[in-house]
Image: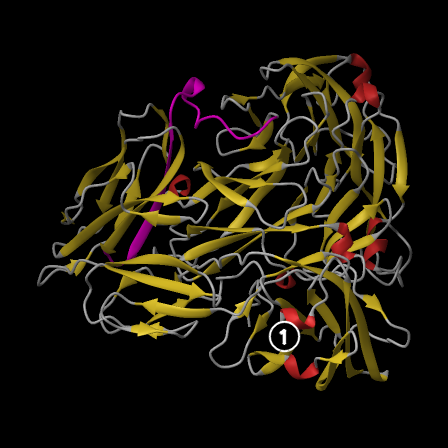
Amino acid sequence: MRRSRTLLRLAVGTMLMTAQLAPGAGRARGATDDLMRVVTPLPGRAVPAHPFVNVVVGLGGNGATVHPRTFRARLGRANVTPLFLPVVEDGAIVGMRATLDPALLLGGGRTNHLRLEVRGRRAGRGAVRDVDHVGFRAFAATDLPPRAQALVDSDVITPGVPLQFDATQSDDPELDFLTYNWDFGDGTTSTDPRPQHAFASDATTTVSLTVSDGQLEDSDRVTLLGVPPLDPGRTAGVLRIATDGALEFGAVPPGTAATRSITVQNLDVTPTSQLKIALAACTYGWPTGECRPDGPFGAPSSTLVLGPAESASIDVGFAPATIGHQAGDVTLAVAASNARVVHLLAHGYGGAAPGGSPGPLPIAEPVFFSSSAAPLEESLPAGQRIVLDLTVGACVASGDACVAPTDCASGACTGTTALDPVDVTRDGAGGIYLLADGSYTDPDPNDPLDLSGTLVHLALDAGGNRLGAAVLARTSSFTTQIAADAIPPAAGGQLYVAQYQPVTAGRRCMRSGLEQLVAIRKSDGTQTVLIPRIDTVEGLGACADDYDPVADLAVARDGSAVFAALLGGIYRLRPTPLVMTSDPAAQAFAVHPDGSLVVVTAEDQGSRGLVHVYKLAPDQAATGAPLLSDLRPCATVSIPNDAGSGKAPATFVTAVAVDPVAPGASDGTIVVGVTTGGGMGVVPAGLAPQATFAIASPAGADTCSVAGIVAVDALGQLVF
């Protein structure tokens, strides 16, 4: 079964919940195994009583068999075990939860002592037990509202065919128990978290979901379109959509309007073929992400009919009334042989922006990225996009990348070559370092490192103009990951490289290579090996296991910590080794200015691609690495994945980066690039749903606020 981001499902008629793993659940004397995880309350922290406090415990993991009947709980001297109810997922008990009323809690800043115990078995070890002690303070707080999210496996209606609805991505900040109420818009309702429902007609219908935590409610809506029926005697044609680019309107002053055109074609030349297309446009409202029909984006409301080999142009309009980034969805419900629904994302900026850019960004520093237009660009906070000059010299004898004669064995650097970077990082002074593989020929044929990459420094001014370049170092083959602190070269800043080395240790040794963590001084290129073998943090052996290459590398802005994504999750390499999360889905991440990790994942649920943004502080992993399914996302955003447009959807994250909101600030702006694989064959790659989101993330906060889509292209290699 595909694992969702939620951890726990209650029994019949209950909910899925998301939560944070407790960072400091202590081990009691005699505790011999990790059979449970305290999800909430967080030990050592003050927790809100609104007016009650939730306790959620996850059971199992690591191959152990847990005996839920042995679960015991005490709050101070009181036995609170009877208050706990089992949490069931797919017929198995995966946790326990309870609600602690104010009468049970100590107030006035005093510490409540919660003792939890469970027993189980582990293969080869027999009976084991786990005891956790949680000390927490409770303070009176106002109840926070839940967040409703309505999902459906298709956003078009076929009369009589059931659709699967899903409310389990809804959540509550305090992990309160949720109840659900669906209104299907045809006079029927349901209280099931995941109901099925069939509609009698194909009329466009709005379905509403209301979730309640017993005190407050929240609602979400989803609009389902009816596919217009073909005329009698007609056969479904083949749809193709074309345009000269994505529906990016750029800057449009409020009170004025702009249009962009898309072309729809019927590729079928059969005399009976026909396409019928109904269009709808909506505008996203953030931070909820609901797409409403009232807004600045518009499309024709009449049904479009195309005969054999016919085509037509559709004008999409953008008429902003306010200043700021705005995004919309143009939906085509189609009677075609290769598609039933196609979504096109649109974006515009209400106001003025320089040079045809998508508009100013909520960032303090320039951001570097790759895109479909160029291998490396720079976007300034005001919005200008600058294609960087990546040309350097070429050694006469070898063609190797060079900047000065000393970079060449022959001493002659006269030609030109364009670098194609495999990774990019900052220099802390407005410039960048880029790693170009295959740009160097090792002059020593016996060198086991087989140097083949080049680290080049590009100095840039505040306007993105190139001031100079220099070769900092050469790297070995298969070296692909670099990262750097935000300290300028002159102040002692360092660059970090996961440097590959081949291993030849005889026939009985599995290992073929390893990666070292190497620090390179920005000012002069001096190299220091910090960790001789990175994958020791995973417990891999020097011979019995082959190496696990680093998938991503990140460094705190002040250089105090280095993190790496490996097959087993995300690990802190320095200052001391620590498993941050053992979830293999945790691959795209960045370091927040407050020192926590921002981890971003994507999944497909029905007709939507869901992008989950998590914040994970080192103290949350100090006594055990959480899975992402244990954590409540600080934000979730969604985009259509075009699941009904002829290809299975595959939403994924292209890049993530975090920028301080101001120099030296601990609050951050998260920028995430997202793309989908849906729609290919019906729309060109540039029109498949993709976007770059901006998300506000205050320092130390567990929640984030989605500012919205700031561009309808999915940026890669994002670096501030």
Image position of 317 with respect to 399: above or below: below
| Quarter of the figure with residue 122 | bottom right
Residue 263 drawn at (x, y percent): 25, 39
Span shown in magenta:
335-364
Left or right of residue 647: residue 275: left
Pointer 1: what residue? 98
Q: Which residue is rendered at x = 55% and y = 65% of the image? A: 4
| Quarter of the figure with residue 353 | top left
Examine the structure image and report whether residue 718 is included in the region drawn in magenta.
no
Q: Which residue is rendered at x = 89% and y = 40% of the image? A: 530
Circle 1 Cα neighbour tier, 10 Å, few/some/many (<14 / 14–19 / ≥20): some
Q: Which residue is rendered at x = 56% and y = 46% of the image? A: 704
Q: Can residue 153 be seen in this view?
A: no
In the foreground, 359 or 389: 359
Left or right of residue 447: residue 365: left
**Kind of element beneath mark 1:** strand
Examine the structure image and report whether residue 348 is included in the region drawn in magenta.
yes
The chosen color scheme is secondary structure
In the foreground, 191 or 580: 191
Quadrant the C terminus occupies: top right
Q: How many labels does the image show?
A: 1
Q: Which residue is rendered at x = 88% and y = 26% of the image? A: 526
For this orientation, the residue located farthest to the left is 232
Q: Is residue 160 visible?
A: yes
Residue 75 drawn at (x, y percent): 75, 74
Image position of 669 with respect to 211: above or below: above
In the foreground, 576 or 501: 576
Which amino acid type corresponds to the residue marked 1 in the rendered image? Ala
In the foreground, 363 or 411: 363
Residue 490 drawn at (x, y percent): 82, 18
Residue 438 drawn at (x, y percent): 70, 33
